[in-house]
Image (cartoon, rainbow, N blue to C red):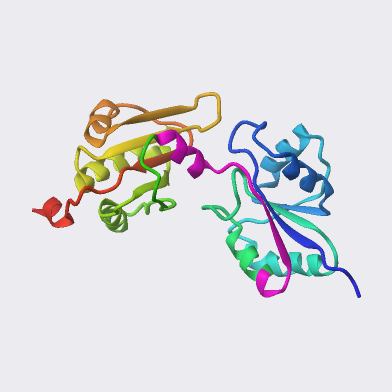
Amino acid sequence: MMEKGRLFIVSTPIGNLEDITLRALRILKESDLIAAEDTRHTRGLLSHYEIHTPLTSLHIYNEHQKIAGLLEQVLQGKDIAVVSDAGTPGISDPGFLIVREARKAGVEVVVIPGVSAVIFAAVASGLELDEFAFYGFPPVKSGRRGKFFERLALEDKTVFFYESPYRIKSALDYIVKYCGESRRVAIIREATKLHEEVLTGNAGELQRDLSERVWKGEFVIGVGRADGRKIEEVEE
């Protein structure tokens, strides 16, 4: 009887190429195939570590078509590693679907842990972490965006979310509107990269001090827990 292969979910650096584990490097070298969110991006990482494993693409636009074929290869004995552009697959990146389908198919899933932008931001923020939530990316359209920040405002725990550099000012405006000027906020920019920056303060202070700033890079925003303030107070 043919021995099944394994599906590896491999965390990769979010910026600094040294932030990868020895185990991750070994798995990437030993796998028969690497399924990458962007093969061009991943090729740079592999080249840096002289890894020559074949690549195929696996992203949100093709995963429904490609997953069955990839899992069939695993069932036939191949080891396949899944990577996203940066960080841990499945955390606001492709990865969830193939893990779900692999478990349905009886494929062994092995997670290779490593860096994650939201965990970096949580530690760097200085906000309370006895409980915290991750909200992914806020919606872009104003109606759904407003509802996102309404829900965030009532959380009794710290909340982290990803945001585009083009909508940082908008996010701060919404935080002030629904959470109030005194809510503690942390903005983590370009984690582990050359221009890494952590900005902390009250929402109102950051809104005023950073109103003219042109933002670039990748961001995680942290918002401290609610203090009992009700949404109704915002709408009066």
Q: Quick check: 209 above or below 98?
A: above
State the image coordinates of residue 145 (x, y, percent, origin top left): 31, 54
Q: Quick check: 168 above or below 65?
A: above
Residue lying furthest front in this view? 130
The quadrant holding residue 173 is top left
The quadrant holding residue 168 is top left
Magenta segment range?
103-125
Q: Is residue 181 magenta?
A: no
For the point 26% across and 45% down, which residue is it? 174
Query: In the depicted view, which residue is nearer to us: 101 or 122?
Result: 122
89 relative position to 107: left or right: left
Residue lying furthest top in this view? 194
Query: In the depicted view, which residue is nearer to us: 30 or 37?
Result: 30
Residue lying furthest right in this view? 1
165 relative position to 52: left or right: left
For the point 50% across and 38% down, which residue is it? 120
State the image coordinates of residue 10 (x, y, percent, origin top left): 68, 49
108 relative position to 207: left or right: right
Q: Quick check: 106 above or below 214?
A: below
Number of numbered markers: 0
